[in-house]
Amino acid sequence: DRDRLSAVALKAYRRLITAWDLSGQQAAALLGVSLSTWDRLKPEGQDKSLSQDQMTRISALVGIYKGLHLLFADGMADRWPRLPNKGPLFGRQSPIDSMIEGGIPQMLEVRRYVDAVRGGL
């Protein structure tokens, strides 16, 4: 049921945005919506049915969040997404900025990257 899953996904996304200390503009861009749409979705209890695209974005981001918390034992898990990264995947951008620019394909690449680093590859 998309409505039920959307409510759970939005709750997780709101917590992720807070943990990563992202701006409203960043939160909106990662979700693939306008700032005004994000402002309507942001408050608890304002759960709307999300599109498949938005569900995919949240799923990838939650996977990154979880992987980082398994990889790092301290606050680095929540700082890492905002730090500039010299790795070829990021082009000297922060993971957040690279995912905003690259959309879902980049989000999935970042998730694979975090999972690979966590797995020792």
Image: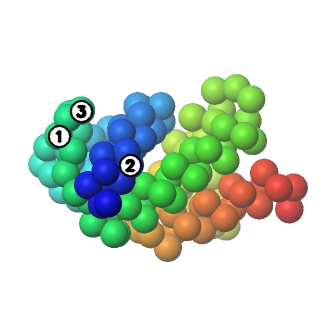
First in sequence: mark 2 or mark 3? 2
Asked whether the viewer can see residue 94, the reply is no
Residue where numbered disc 1 is placed: 46
Q: Position of residue 71 (x, y in %)?
A: 75, 41
> Mark 3: which secondary structure?
loop
Label number found at residue 9: 2
Based on the displayed image, in which of its 4 quarters is residue 92 positioned?
bottom right
Nearest to the observer: residue 45 or residue 82 = 45
> Mark 1: which secondary structure?
loop
Q: Position of residue 52 (x, y in %)?
A: 33, 69
Nearest to the observer: residue 39 or residue 11 = 11
User: Circles 1 and 3: CB distance less than 8 Å?
Assistant: yes
Q: Amino acid at mark 2?
A: Ala
Q: Amino acid at mark 3?
A: Glu
Task: Tell me: 73 left or right of 120.
Answer: left
The residue under the point 36% across, 53% down is: 5
Q: CA distance from mark 1 to mark 3?
A: 5 Å
> What sort of colour scheme is used for the picture?
rainbow
Q: Residues within 10 Å of mark 3 (few under 14, many from 20)?
A: few
Q: Residues within 10 Å of mark 2 (few under 14, many from 20)?
A: many
Residue where numbered disc 3 is placed: 44
First in sequence: mark 1 or mark 2? 2
Give the quadrant of the C terminus. Answer: bottom right
The residue under the point 66% across, 64% down is: 112
